[in-house]
Amino acid sequence: MMQQFDVAVLGAGAAGMMCAAVAAQRGRRVVLLDHSGTLAEKIRISGGGRCNFTNRRVGPENFLSANPHFCKSALAGYTPQDFIGLVNSHGIAWHEKHRGQLFCNDSSQSIIDMLRTECDRAGVAWRMPCSVAQVTHEANGAFLLATSQGELRATRLVIATGGLAIPQLGATDFGLKIARQFGLKVVEPRPALVPLTFDGVAWEHFSELAGVALEAGVSTGRGRGRQTFLEDVLFTHRGLSGPGILQISSYWQPGEPIELDLAPGQQITDLLIAAKSGNRQQLGTVLSASWPRRLAEQWLGEQAVLRMADAPDRVLRELGQRIQAWSLVPSGTAGYKKAEVMRGGVDTRGLDQRSLQAKSVPGLHFIGEVVDVTGWLGGYNFQWAWSSAVACGRSL
Ligand SMILES: Cc1cc2nc3c(=O)[nH]c(=O)nc-3n(C[C@H](O)[C@H](O)[C@H](O)COP(=O)(O)OP(=O)(O)OC[C@H]3O[C@@H](n4cnc5c(N)ncnc54)[C@H](O)[C@@H]3O)c2cc1C
């Protein structure tokens, strides 16, 4: 028998559950479908299992998009403070980490439970696990979905199937396919918030540093397009990771270099030259005072045993330059398997910023990560999921 709904939301992740709850609270008959047997796997694993659910300071500058102004309206309509209010109303304890990042005290599961409760209280119908084989747009404007649990018809269709990151947890390109099916443009998707990899002999030297972490300034791009983050960087066997690298990876263009300042806020050349006079210590010992020892030794090579007093200024200048403006070209990224998000997605120029509705297809909406709005590391991607979902839910 044909099942009839006002709204069908496809994808019961962060954005899908939020949108379904808001629409159902407004009296709409809502069905929420997901092909996975387990609810909201990405929320579960997020923030190291504690879900960095938002950030105290959220602005459009924290997002990447081919259309940077698009996110403003949704973010202003449902703010971090609004989400904190919801979290508090469910009695979920949370704490703030550095840079305004908010995490659950206990576990990400409490955010999943909260969203599920919001949906259930509002009377959302669940179809899970349930896959959708085909979506047809009927002449009357309704959407017909052929699913593994039978056919259903809905006046509005909300695509909340997320991005391509972590395919092993059920990520698919379904949302992008639907966008193309309905003639919407897609900004080329790429892994983002992802470790960078380096090939070749030059890197073999550094791969021995796997496990070493330090704070660094990490930059890419030129002129007004230049982006810099001051965060920790981690050496791995295949390349570089850590928050600073994940952040810059979203801005990095293949073939372009990244630059690292491995002693941010210091003038290493001046410090070393000033420390020379009468100093019998070895260069390696001096550098290890402010750097991880393994890094200092590896970095200096044979120069590590140079006595400070004997080190030519020229050598110290070159060293300072290499430490504070280390330029290197990644060979690639660790790919979707290791990425936290996808950048790119449904082109926002084809969407209405208030309702996230496709301008050319009334009744078809895209929310969350499938849309070409990608947040920084630090709770921004969930805030986009909540804000875009609420903007859409209120419009349905
Ligand atoms: C390891 C990791 C850690 C992260 N940590 C954080 C963090 O701490 N803070 C933060 O802000 N962001 C974090 N993120 C990013 C964040 O999880 C996502 O940006 C966010 O979940 C996107 O929400 P969404 O609802 O758009 O998509 P998702 O939450 O991914 O939900 C999409 C849903 O659609 C379903 N689906 C997919 N394809 C289909 C299909 N064909 N048919 C039916 N259903 C389908 C999926 O099963 C899934 O349930 C993290 C991501 C990863 C991978």
Image (cartoon, helix red, strand yellow):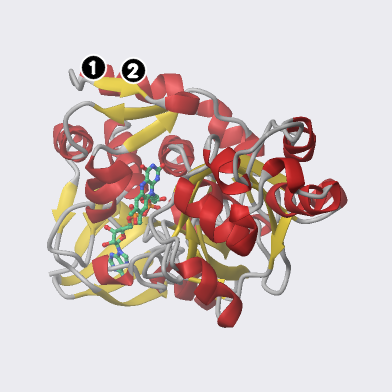
The image quadrant in which ligand 1 is located:
bottom left
**Quarter location, residue 353:** top right
Asked whether residue 359 appears in the rendered view, the answer is no
From the viewer's side, name the closer residue of 156 and 298: 298
- The picture places residue 237, in percent across and down from the top left corner, at 41, 69
Residue kind at label 2, given as amino acid type: Gly
Residue at (69% x, 31% y) in the render: 265
- The picture places residue 286, in percent across and down from the top left corner, at 59, 39
Please say if the residues under marks 2 and 1 sit with CB atoms less than 8 Å apart.
yes
Callout 1: SS: helix
Q: Name the residue under label 1.
A: 89
Q: In this view, does 128 lie to the left or right of 237?
A: left
**Quarter location, residue 154:** bottom left
Quarter occupied by the N terminus = bottom left
- The picture places residue 257, in percent across and down from the top left corner, at 72, 65
Residue kind at label 1, given as amino acid type: Ser
From the viewer's side, name the closer residue of 201 and 318: 318
| Mark 1 Cα-neighbour bin, 10 Å: few <14, some 14–19, many ≥20 | few
Q: Name the residue under label 2.
A: 85
From the viewer's side, name the closer residue of 247 and 148: 247
From the viewer's side, name the closer residue of 156 and 68: 68
Quarter occupied by the C terminus = top left
Residue at (49% x, 55% y) in the render: 193
Asked whether residue 259 appears in the rendered view, the answer is yes
Is 283 situated above or below 337?
above
Distance from label 2 to label 1 (Cα)? Answer: 6 Å
- The picture places residue 273, in percent across and down from the top left corner, at 79, 37
Of all residues shown, which one is farthest toward the bottom? 200
